Image (tube, coloured by chain):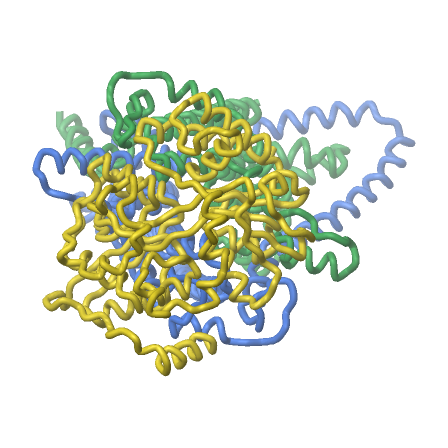
Amino acid sequence: MLLALLGGVLFAQDKPKVEPWVCPPGFEGQKLSVFNWSTYIAEDTIPNFEKACGVTVDYSIYESSEAMLSKIIQGNPGYDIVVPSGNTVGRMIELDLAIPLDKSLIPNFANVSEALRDPSYDPGNVYSIPYQWGTIGVGYNREKVGYEITSWEQVWNYPGKVAWLNDPRAIMGIGLHLLGFDPNSTDADEIAQARDFLISKGGNVVAIAGDDGQVLLERGDVDITIEYNGDIVNLGYECECDTFAYVVPEEGSVIWVDSMMIPKDAPNVALAHAFIDYILHPQVGADISNYTTYASPNQAAIDLGLIEEVYLNDPAIYPDEKKLERLFSIDHVGSEVEVIYSNAWDELLIFLGR
Amino acid sequence: MLEAQARRRQQRSGLLLALPAIIWLGLFFLLPLGIVGVFSFLTREAAGIVSLPFTLEHYERTFGVFSVVLWRSVWISVVSTVICLLIGYPLAFFIATRQNNWVRQLCLFMVVLPFWTNFLVRTYAWRILLGDQGTINAILQGLGLIDAPLTLLNTPFAVILGLVYGFLPFMVLPIYASVDRFDFKYVDAAHDLGANDIKAFFRVVLPMTLPGVFAGSALVFIPCVGAFVTPDLLGGTQGLMIGNLISRQFGQSLNLPLGSALSVTMMLIVMVALLAYVRLGNRRLGG
Amino acid sequence: MSAAQTVQQSFSSEVKTRTFEVNERQLSLDRLVRRIGKVGLLFNPIFSFFFLWAPILVLVIFSFNDSRSVATFSGFTLRWYLNIFSGAVGAGDNFSTALLLDSLRNSLVIGVIATLISSVIGTMVSLALSRSDFPGKRVLDAVLYLPVVIPEITQGVSLAVFFNAIFGWWNMTTGQRVSMGLETVIIGHVAFTISFVAVVVRARLADMNPKLEEAARDLGANEWRTFWAITFPLALPGIIAGALLAFTLSLDDFLVTFFTSGAGTNTLPVFVYGLLRLTVTPEINAISTIMILASTLLIGISLALQGRNAVRG
């Protein structure tokens, strides 16, 4: 609380570098429904948008791209904005579940970093615009583990309690990668091998965390968790201690980009465009990244110095060149192959930790 | 003639009274169950929809890899039911044999009140208690009984504890009703005939309160098999139950036919267990 | 009865074969057993009540704890409670006071409407089953018990599949979009509470003296009059008990709601589940304590009402 206040004072004093975002007229009294990951937005992002546009926002959360997609796929129950990761963006496009974006309504798209535009799963950003990006790695409790973790092998062999992330494609991708296969393999036999490999390495797994590995780690229920980087990094900054560390193992791991999309049958497409433009505003984007400690795709926010120095210089948030080489992305492989992955994940859940 | 007319009128009014329930249960209970039954034989489409042709694939998976979790669900439920019975019977017996009406009401109130608290909250309380840095480990370590925290959370043990805690009142109340109805003159008679307490209990009291035991066991066993919240919050990987996997098929991987097949199988397991139980009960009670 | 008789017979035959000395030793043994039994019978409720209440007490105590820990109590605070009402809950982007109140309102709306519908339907079907004969009565009797014995998750799942199929078909034929929401949750709750209402009301109707209704009819009252003048007032305690049960089941239900609610229709249990899964803040303990307090008040009020009814009846 005090920190937030201090932060607010600091911002007010020496960072009035951008004009605040202005809402296009005509939205007063309307409603927007946003469906986003848990722990993935700043506290004032939604209230400020509501104030700027005079609208009300229904904000709901999910804990995996799968869970989000399973709601949309059965007929959009009324969401205007969803924020899937790369492979799910591809799936939504393939299944005709997304609405093409009108870039003329999103002038702030110019703020998006060149490197993150035009992804393989959505050439030309027709349907999706980056929200935040990051990595998947290992969060661990230094005091309990007693040494620095640098490799996946150490995670598999750890004698204490471990949690994995409920992100089937990412975890299977890591398994495939460690076996020397393409992490986006479409070969049923390779996927089966990765599944068996992971089951054999998962004897110490006590829980599959649905985007709440940081909670298990903080509460002491596990000593090591596979998680998205921001959630663990945030824990470290919040407790102002060295207890919690985040590492991308040397064998390599996953890099991901989550993107905003407007799902088919969204009730308020126009307001959804305004919301995307709002998120891409340098100050708004910076506020989100400063709060969630994920990396911002907003080049303008970085160039204007709106992202706090500490975070920009933290290699756990913005990996350096050398680390980037070790990272691979999870790509769209088509729904038929996704079924193979999902079945493999069922089997992994059944036999894990025994 | 007049009587037949009256009967027909009474039949018609009876049917009329029953009609709303017939329609509602038919439309929103039996029909959905039927659809799930049909879905369980259909083919899964990649886009999350189902289609013809009919297939037994989902039942093959259910009785193949998923059988591990099916069996775990059954044994966890059986153990939870037995523990509920072992705790619940003496408790119900104690309450029902209090002479003071006020004390009896208070005891019942003490059993029922936690039951009125939201089920999720009660389950969450155990998460606080059982954690490595939770209350139980803190107390045990404070007393110097253990050095390192015990692993309690994310185990089948935690799930059984949560289920017993959640459904104990279901066991106590029917048994209480049975014992309350029981006439203790039979025990005096047994004593007069030379039976000691143990014999009197097992040969007179227990057989005559069996209806309560059977009802209570069924009421505990059924929700245990289909449990989702308890294993989800307390079970981790080793306490995974069939309810979690069913929910996953509908909420995440969107494999409706497999989820349907798992649901149908679970329902059949419960039905078969209940039928066997009722059979056993009838033989015991019927003599 | 017959069981008890056979038991008595078997006792008497055994007594005859006993010798005096064995009885003497047996007697002291029996006294020991009785003493152990008495102690055991006292120990069990003490243990049971502790088991039932300790988790709740821990939750309540630590909701006032001046630290995030649930292991040591470091001081008294009302901070977590104040946070709930000011909406300043730390780590959770899924919490706001408005969302909490919203889910509470949804729960009450669903609970009241579902209870009203299922009480009426449940009472009607109980009357039909206990007062008249019609074709298919036995089948209905069996079906009525099914929702009680089928796991809730199966009911939730089947309703989800059913609504999706119906809405998908509706969308295809008319082009109109319909999705799950409050209405579907209410439909689901009515479907599984009818049976519970019926069980309770039928028990009450079975206890009533049918002569009273016959007498009313003999005195010239028609069916309608008889019902309102005799049957309904006498069945009312049963109907109220059934309705209360239905309301409780509806308020506490998680699984059926979880599967039949659409976007933004959180009930209190579904909302709390989201919090439990994804938040670690001590505010959860405070919210839980408030919920415990609310249900204690509710049961207290209902008991007081029932007590007064019992005195009057």
Which corner quadrant holds the C terminus of chain A? top right
Rendered shade, chain B: green
Q: What residue lies at 75% left-to-right and 23% top-to-bottom?
A: C13
Rendered shade, chain A: yellow
Residue nearer the viewer, B106 or B251: B251
Rendered shade, chain C: blue
Toward the right, the furthest residue is C21
Query: How many tags in the picture?
Result: 0
Quarter of the image for residue B137 reads bottom right
Residue C26 visible, this angle:
yes
Q: What residue lies at 47% left-to-right and 21% top-to-bottom?
A: B63
Residue nearer the viewer, A329 or A136: A329
Task: Tell me: residue C60, above or below residue A14.
Answer: above
Residue B114: x %, y % from top left? 52, 56
Q: What residue lies at 24% left-to-right and 19% top-to-bottom?
A: B52
Residue B127: x %, y % from top left? 56, 53
Toward the left, the furthest residue is C174
A258 relative to A213 in the view: left or right: left
Residue C201: x %, y % from top left? 34, 45
Task: Tell me: residue A281, above or below residue C206.
Answer: below
Residue B98 visible, this angle:
no
B46 relative to C9 in the view: left or right: left
